[in-house]
Image: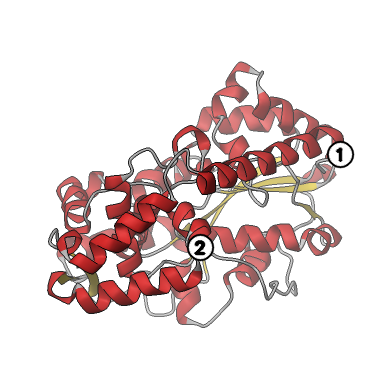
């Protein structure tokens, strides 16, 4: 893709649709931190985020606003179209855009006409995504065990939106009038490339933008911490209610780094008898057939083009988890009790943290109302 406007100088509107666990936070951090460099190359990354400063989740989570032609998302996009002016290329980014359907895309094109709508979707090995999404779900307060999570999606097979990217991709490729670039997460990693550089060059036509050295990413915590957060959510199911800190945030912000380190070390040492591993092969006929289908369907739209005729990883996946005897380990039980007190909804620490989070969102909302978003 080129950053130059399509025919007539109308400009382009690019939706980066994620999905989850494909370096989205890292990409958004670089989009936001490199706004000036992107604008020099013809791309505007607008300041529309309230819930998350660097992304556009508030827009992506309200597609019905566009169909009603009213509501916060519709009004923000109308304002953006007016402020950006004719011919400016616009980049929007949120995992939530992957849930949008053609009718939402059509409504978006109506707002930003005559800009050309384009999409960018990052494809990652589904088995890697399966585990990463379980860990994220636990961080958000989920309590399902890893074996149960795996079995749920195994039984769904090709009906699982995690294990079968074609469910989401199918609606995209069936609309050839909406160009889409498919970035190959694992091929990019195999070549030792930076995914932001690849995105900028392949999806925006804007090479030579260096990633910010301090750009944050959602790094997966150790298995021991994930299990601890899961057990904490089972004991404190009200964490995260009313838009407050979710379980993972509560542990990260209300427990000190030495406390978190002690949790991991204690579970690893004292909970060794509860430790289990799961190995899953990627060489099953169904998995290999899915890979072939994706390669055949996406063809030249894949970037970079796979060198070995593969877009998934080949080696088996091995994951660590802890069985239901872990909370019965005395030292682990003591740590859970201590953490439960510190993260108790209504407690001093949680109240202050939740109020801080609320004020941050309010500040972003006020800023968006008073200052330009373009």
Disc on the earlier residue, 2 or 1: 2
Q: Position of residue 176 (x, y in %)?
A: 53, 44
Front-lying residue, 147 or 193: 147
Front-lying residue, 373 or 353: 353
Left or right: 109 in relation to 127: right
Q: Position of residue 266 (x, y in %)?
A: 29, 74
Left or right: 48 in relation to 341: right
Residue beneath the point at 32% across and 63% down: 335
Which residue in the protein does label 1 denote? 371
Residue beneath the point at 74% across and 51% down: 45
The 10 Å Cα crowd at callout 2, few under 14, some 14 to 19, many 20 or more, is few
Front-lying residue, 284 or 341: 341
Q: Position of residue 130 (x, y in %)?
A: 31, 58
Residue beneath the point at 78% across and 60% down: 38
Q: Confirm whether residue 120 shows in the render.
A: yes
Taking 144 as reference, is 260 above or below it?
below
Left or right: 262 in relation to 283: right
Q: Position of residue 141 (x, y in %)?
A: 36, 46
Which residue in the protein does label 2 denote? 218
């Amino acid at each position: 893709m080129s950053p130059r406007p399509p025919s007539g100088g109308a400009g382009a509107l690019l939706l980066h649709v994620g999905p989850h666990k494909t370096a989205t936070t890292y990409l958004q951090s670089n989009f936001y931190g490199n706004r000036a460099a992107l604008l020099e190359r013809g791309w505007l990354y607008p300041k529309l985020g309230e819930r998350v400063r660097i992304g556009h989740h508030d827009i992506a989570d309200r597609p019905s606003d566009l169909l009603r032609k009213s509501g916060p998302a519709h009004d923000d996009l109308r304002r953006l179209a007016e402020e950006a002016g004719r011919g400016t290329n616009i980049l929007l980014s949120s995992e939530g855009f992957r849930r949008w359907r053609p009718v939402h895309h059509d409504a978006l094109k109506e707002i930003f006409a005559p800009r050309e709508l384009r999409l960018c979707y990052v494809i990652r090995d589904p088995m890697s995504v399966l585990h990463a999404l379980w860990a994220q779900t636990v961080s958000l307060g989920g309590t399902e065990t890893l074996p149960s999570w795996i079995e749920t999606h195994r039984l769904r097979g090709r009906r699982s939106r995690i294990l079968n990217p074609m469910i989401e991709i199918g609606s995209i490729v069936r609309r050839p009038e909406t160009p889409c670039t498919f970035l190959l997460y694992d091929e990019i990693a195999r070549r030792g490339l930076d995914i932001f550089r690849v995105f900028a060059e392949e999806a925006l036509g804007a090479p030579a933008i260096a990633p910010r050295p301090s750009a944050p990413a959602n790094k997966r915590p150790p298995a021991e911490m994930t299990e601890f957060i899961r057990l904490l959510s089972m004991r404190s199911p009200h964490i995260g209610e009313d838009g407050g800190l979710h379980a993972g945030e509560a542990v990260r912000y209300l427990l000190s780094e030495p406390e978190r380190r002690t949790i991991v070390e204690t579970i690893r040492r004292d909970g060794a008898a509860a430790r289990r591993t799961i190995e899953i092969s990627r060489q099953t006929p169904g998995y290999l057939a899915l890979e072939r289908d994706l390669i055949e369907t996406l063809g030249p739209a894949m970037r970079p083009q796979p060198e070995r005729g593969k877009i998934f990883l080949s080696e088996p996946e091995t994951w660590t988890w802890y069985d239901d005897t872990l909370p019965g380990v005395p030292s682990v039980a003591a740590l859970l009790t201590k953490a439960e007190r510190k993260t108790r909804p209504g407690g001093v620490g949680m109240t202050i943290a939740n109020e801080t989070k609320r004020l941050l969102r309010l500040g972003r909302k006020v800023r968006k109302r008073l200052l330009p978003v373009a």
